[in-house]
Image (cartoon, helix red, strand yellow):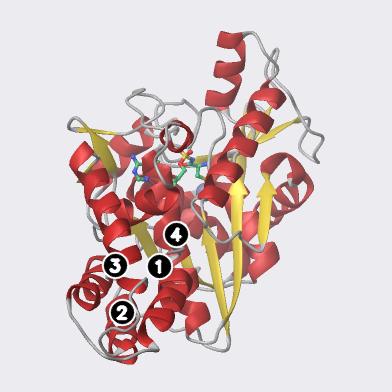
Amino acid sequence: MAVEPRDGTARLYVCGITPYDATHLGHASTYLAFDTLVRVWRDQGHEVRYVQNVTDIDDPLLERAVRDGVRWQDVAERETALFRDDMTALRVLPPTWYVGAVEAMEEISQLVQRLLDAGAAYTVDGDVYFSVAAAENFGSVSHLDAQTMLALSAERGGDPDRPGKKDPLDCLLWMQQRDGEPGWPSPFGVGRPGWHVECTAMALNRLGDQLDVQGGGSDLVFPHHELSAAEAEVATGVHPFARAYVHAGMVGLDGEKMSKSLGNLVFVSKLVASGTEPGALRLALLGSHYRTDREWTPAVLARGEARLAAWREGVARGSGPDGAAALSAVRQALYDDLDTPAALAAVDAWCDAEGTDPQAPALVRDFVDALVGVAL
Ligand code: 5CA
Ligand code: ZN
């Protein structure tokens, strides 16, 4: 991706987890893609301001708590802690701000108020909706036709068929408290926010009116990133909300997207507990380009493990081929839309060749640590 921050500061928002089940390899690979971006920006000398949210109140979380007979807060806390441990094990650099929706209720309701004041929101039976008609550039994130938008909205948390809405694609900004559900006070009554506006508020309040990159997996292109952008742009008058929308491909298992709702999951924590080295997992996931959809198979992990072993042997040598040339090949690959397969191949090539540079092994160990995030 050719995203050069405009000044010395890079502004990144990446959509975080909904903590109702453990971190699976799909999550891990998406956060590794953005971790690579953070490492590249830092390598280029930019200060990185990075916000990641936790959707720690949402329908699936409430449903899981009811199913298991536990408090929703306990599910959220437990799974968020596990996610953070998994990210630490994978050496993912922590974001500057890591914010839960429940910590941000006031700023979210302030943004809802701003949208009401701008005439871009209305109520249906007490619930507040965002009006997509108010967003001049609606569609500019996903470029999808109306039919596809409607189908995805129904699939991914929207309510296109609810009577009383001005447009089926209008999305919830604030819903009145439902029976047996938690609620937070707001100028429009006790309730909880819609999904998209949470991310919009957290991003605007920490990163300003324009992001360099809005990131997440490709399942968030529509409606989540389209609607988040529409809300931000109506509130601020700044288009585009993000200078680049970057989406990671989906990791699948046995031909289906790995997802909590399908239950076909491979967990980071389980793999690590059963002896898989996090560094090998990292190399396994970075072995494909972040944009491609891919399958998780035992062969993918085996390739990561073999790589880790070969790289460790390579840097344990007393000398090797020109280390500076290897560094520049890795940089060139990563600076070109985070081409991790090419970057990893450049390190393979350095390990496979013989050379007499006595400084090279230490240099390669250092730049693999900094840019690839693996300790050799
Ligand atoms: N909390 C919202 C975003 S605000 C959410 O989508 N949470 S999530 O837990 O479902 O997903 C967390 C992140 O992992 C998102 O960026 C999502 O796009 C990504 N993701 C989910 N499943 C996969 C998968 N199978 N492969 C790659 N990335 C995935
Ligand atoms: Zn989000």
Q: Is residue 129 left or right of residue 366?
A: right
Which amino acid type corresponds to the residue marked 4 in the rendered image?
Gly
Q: Are marks 2 and 4 in contact (CB under 8 Å)?
A: no
Q: Is residue 203 left or right of residue 366?
A: right
Pick out the residue farthest to the front: 318
Q: Nearer the viewer, mark 2 or mark 4?
A: 2
Residue linked to disc 4: 215
Q: Are marks 4 and 1 in contact (CB under 8 Å)?
A: no
Residue shown at 70%/63% (left/top)?
205
Q: Are marks 3 and 1 in contact (CB under 8 Å)?
A: yes
Q: Nearer the viewer, residue 333 or 116?
A: 333
Residue shown at 18%/73% (left/top)?
352
Q: Are marks 2 and 1 in contact (CB under 8 Å)?
A: yes
Cα gap from disc 3 to disc 4, whole angstroms: 17 Å
Cα gap from disc 3 to disc 1, whole angstroms: 8 Å
Residue shown at 68%/32% (left/top)?
77
Which amino acid type corresponds to the residue marked 1 in the rendered image?
Val
Indicate the secondary structure of the residue bearing disc 1.
helix
Which amino acid type corresponds to the residue marked 2 in the rendered image?
Val
Disc with the residue nearer the chain's start (3 vs 4)? 4
Q: Nearer the viewer, mark 3 or mark 4?
A: 3
Mark 4 CB lies closer than 8 A to ligand 1: yes
